[in-house]
Amino acid sequence: MSRTSIRSAGNALGLGPELWDSHFMRACRGEASERVPVWLMRQAGRYMAEYRAVRADRDFLGMCEPKIAAEVTITAQQRIDADAAIIFADILLILKGFGLDLTFAAGEGPRLSPPIRSAADLDRLAAPGEAAERCAYVAEACRLTRDGLDPHIPLIGFCGAPFTVAAYAIEGQGSRQWATVRKFMYEQPAVFHRLQEMLVAALGPYLRRQIEAGAQAVQIFDSWVGMLTEADYREFVLPHLQALVSQIPDGAPVICFGTNTAHLTSAIAASGCDVLGVDHTTDLAATWDALGGPDHISIQGNLDPAALLAGEERLLAMSEQVLAAAGNRPGYIFNLGHGVFKETDVERVIALIKHVHARGG
Ligand code: CP3
């Protein structure tokens, strides 16, 4: 399957002018806009009182039910005046679709059981089409969100990348070193590839449904892929990411993001993504130049999320450094280098977004 880059696909999704000409969509296509679009990874989360109030009555999976997810998504976008909304969901929901038990214990992060450790474990998983089907509630959340969202504000759908989702499935939880994953990758490469193939076969339809239901763009989170060398990335990861990107319909921009990926940016760009999300340890200006600039790819990032814990003066100075690195080039989307910390004061977030908007494009 081949996919046409967003720069030449035209309005294949048939968007109305409000969305087609929005600052965010223009930036995804590398076109100039009157202002720099800004949204923040994890803009709907525990730092926001409105989120905590809804969360108080239900567990995390209850937050992902369509009506609640739509409410949380829209509230967060409005509260901070972001130029895009991202659907409230999680990269691990697809593993629940495959039949793994998924829990988010308070203060512990996600747990998946039983973890995948062998070829026989793959045989116990649901078929990929079935896994996608069991996650249809995320597309329904997109539909309700699109109905309630400001018509000028694009909705971003998302999923985890095959590598990062496989890493959680194998490890059974988050990890600092991901040693179990890398041992598995080297000792059972065929099973590792097969697991990612199964994930791609589910994540493709999962993202396509989000787009059909009202998402205008998608982000693929490969949060922990930065642990790999470039050679291992190209051997074990890139073919699967390319396979996933190729399944996204023409006209829907694809953003690929990972942390600690400064050494991988040209390899990630080879996925065919339209926008590269860079974290705060990556040199935004040098990376963009090396990739050929806005004619070739758009860039999203990369303010250190810790800047939002600093005083306003330092926060705005740090955001100026990021804007200077982007240098008024078209095709730039302001964001953090990773998700908003839960310790963040929402007023700082609002001040940041006002500042980026006042700067103009
Ligand atoms: O606003 C948004 O960006 C959309 C919502 C969103 C969530 N998770 C909600 C969530 C998104 C985009 C994600 C993606 C996600 N989930 C990633 C990739 C992005 C990244 O941060 O690198 C990863 C690695 C996960 C896996 C995950 N989900 C972890 C590690 C945790 C625990 C984190 C924590 O702070 O406890 C989650 C749970 C989760 N997903 C929360 C939220 C708001 C916190 C849940 C809660 O207790 O209310």
Image: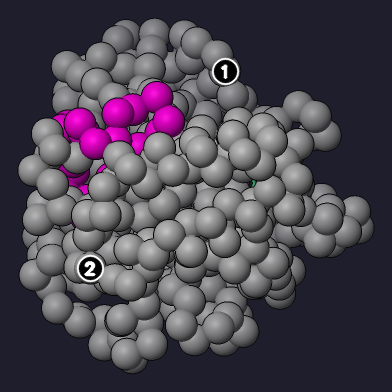
Mark 2 highlights which residue?
32
- Residue at the extreme bottom of the image, as rendered: 16
Is 322 or 332 nearer to us in this picture?
A: 322
Mark 1 highlights which residue?
175
Residue 299: assigned label: none
Q: Amino acid at mark 2?
A: Ala
Residue 276, x across and y down, in percent: 28, 45
What residue range appears in magenta? 266-287
User: Which of the image's four quarters has the C terminus?
Assistant: bottom left
Left or right of residue 141, residue 324 in this image: left
Q: Are marks 1 and 2 in contact (CB under 8 Å)?
A: no
Left or right of residue 55, residue 120 in this image: left
Colour convention:
one colour
Ligand 1: give its quadrant: top right
Q: Amino acid at mark 1?
A: Ser
Q: Residue at x 79, y 34 (%)?
A: 105
Q: Which of pointers 1 and 2 lies earlier in the amino acid sequence? A: 2
